[in-house]
Image: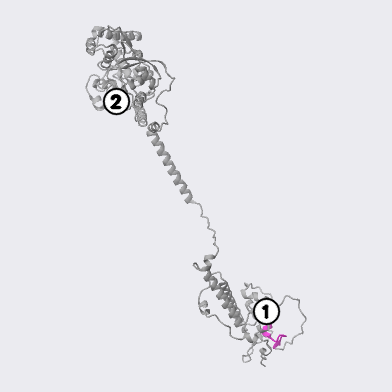
Amino acid sequence: MPEPDARNGAVPNDLFGSLPTARSPLADLHARSAPAPGSRRALREAAEQDAAAREAVARHAAQRHGVDQPAPQPVTPPQATPPQQTAPQSPASDSITTSTGSVRTAAHDAGIAALMAPSTATWPVPVQAAAAQAAPTAHSAQVPDPQAPAAHEPDAQDPVPFASPVQAAVEPADGEQATERQLDDEQDEDEEAADEPGSLNSLFAPEQHHDVPKKKRGRGCLIGLLVVLVVLGGIAAGGVWVWNQYGDKISDVMGWGPSKDYEAGMAEGEALVTIKTGDTGAMVSTSLYSAKVTKTDSAFYDYLIAENKAITFYPGVYKMQQKMTAAAALAALEDPANRMENTVSVGEGGTVAATLPRIVDGVGIPLEELQAAVKDPKTYGVQAATLEGWLFPAVYTFDPGATAQDVIKAMVDRTQEALSAAGVAPADAQRILTIASIVQREGHTADFDKVSRVIENRLDPANDETHGLLQMDSTAQYGYGLTHEGPVSSWPWDAVVNDQNPWNTYAHAGLPASPISNPSEAAIKAAQNPADGPWFYFVTVNLDTGETVFSATYAEQQAAEAEYQKWCEDNPDGGCY
């Protein structure tokens, strides 16, 4: 028999529960718009979709067992209060009316039993299940329609239908549920709109700070480091190259290098400086440096320029000291007491043509008289075509009435004394003087005996290196007329070595036609007593120190010449040719 209408005994609130719920005019717009990710609306809709999916699974399982899935019924979950004694119910009764007037059917009891029974399936708790903690109300019970057919009553043999946790939750009435959902949707839309950029709330919202993930340092950092090292290495290498090429000039400009001048108070010893007629400030500066008076070749001249000095130099021999400052050297040259009267200084390695003007400046004898005095060597007991090599280098002082022949004879006699002291026989004097003159021009004093040995080895016509050719630059220069004329780098070397004059030892085997300079006593002794050695070649590899390398083969000579070229590259102003 149909159930009585439960609403007859319902409280007044039930009257409003069945009324239509007011809806927002934007409900349809909200329903069509997608919820913002992470909003409450998105979470609720996800939970509803999950619940619908589980309900479909449960219905499908019930149909497989031949049981119609009952319509969802609100079930009041068991309370946490202690159990109370209730009267036993008749199993034949189809429904039981509770004290609140709601109706509980047998299917309802089966659903509760299934809910209370332990289950092996684990389901996530839906959002609406939290409403189960609220106390049930009278209007939350669902009253069946009297016109609807009676629900299937399961017997003992029917399987217990699966009860979804969503079905076990207490849901609000349709109108109330729709109202709450609309309010939640509207609140979610308002929150999403407030968070949009450019909204009023976004202007006053606190700044959001997000952690920026740290970039991983890997190959990029290593490549960057290598690039920095390469750039720094290139800069360092460029700096080294610039310093090697222009370090001296940079030091001079910046004032970093050592001083070009001696310090005051360092002067010592004695030095004789000869000033010739027509000498300029630069030439006098070179003469002072050659006599070891000044520290560098340009020290004296630089001082004259810096002080704007206009000096007139008088020819003669001046008695000075070594290691003088440029200022002190100038003061000594201006002092008449330091000029030696009737004194001549003949330099080592000089020629007859270079010596005669010195005599003019020191003694005052006319040049024509001196040239006439040297025309006939036999006048002085010399068996040679000229007096080249016979004017011994030294300092001479003559009486005021000395003639040109007196001066020349004094110099030739001094050469004879040096030859005798070295043990040279008169018949061999011209040959020894010729070798000594080459030694004087080619080598340094410490290497004179080795240079003499190279000459002797090359003069041997049976040698396999030069085949009797001396191949000495100094002899070719003398024969070409370039001795003491201009810088060596300006000389036309191809023309010099190919000229067929009798002093060109590149073109003619053996000794040149005569001595090429005035040899010192040390050079005469070296020519008479050469060192022992297999050398055929030698080259000065450092023009500043005079370091010379002697070689027995041409291959060794080439290696030494490469060393010399390297020094010239590093010292562009060192006087290389």
Q: Judging from the image, what secondary structure is the residue with disc 2 in? A: helix
Magenta region: 94-116
Quadrant in the picture for the C terminus: top left
Q: Residues within 10 Å of mark 2 (few under 14, many from 20)?
A: some
Give amino acid for label 1: Ala
Q: Is residue 149 above or below residue 334?
A: below
Q: Judging from the image, what secondary structure is the residue with disc 1 in? A: helix
Residue 320: mark: none
- Please indicate, yes or no, whether residue 424 appears anywhere in the rendered image: no
Give amino acid for label 2: Val
Residue 488: mark: 2
The magenta stretch spans residue 279: no
Depth check, front residue: 137 or 67: 137
Q: Residues within 10 Å of mark 1 (few under 14, many from 20)?
A: some
- Residue 571, horizontal then vertical, whole percent: 36, 30
Q: Residue furthest bottom?
A: 1
Residue 114: mark: 1
Mark 1 or 2 closer to N-term? Answer: 1
Relative placement, left or right, of 283 versus 371 is right
Residue 171: name its quadrant: bottom right
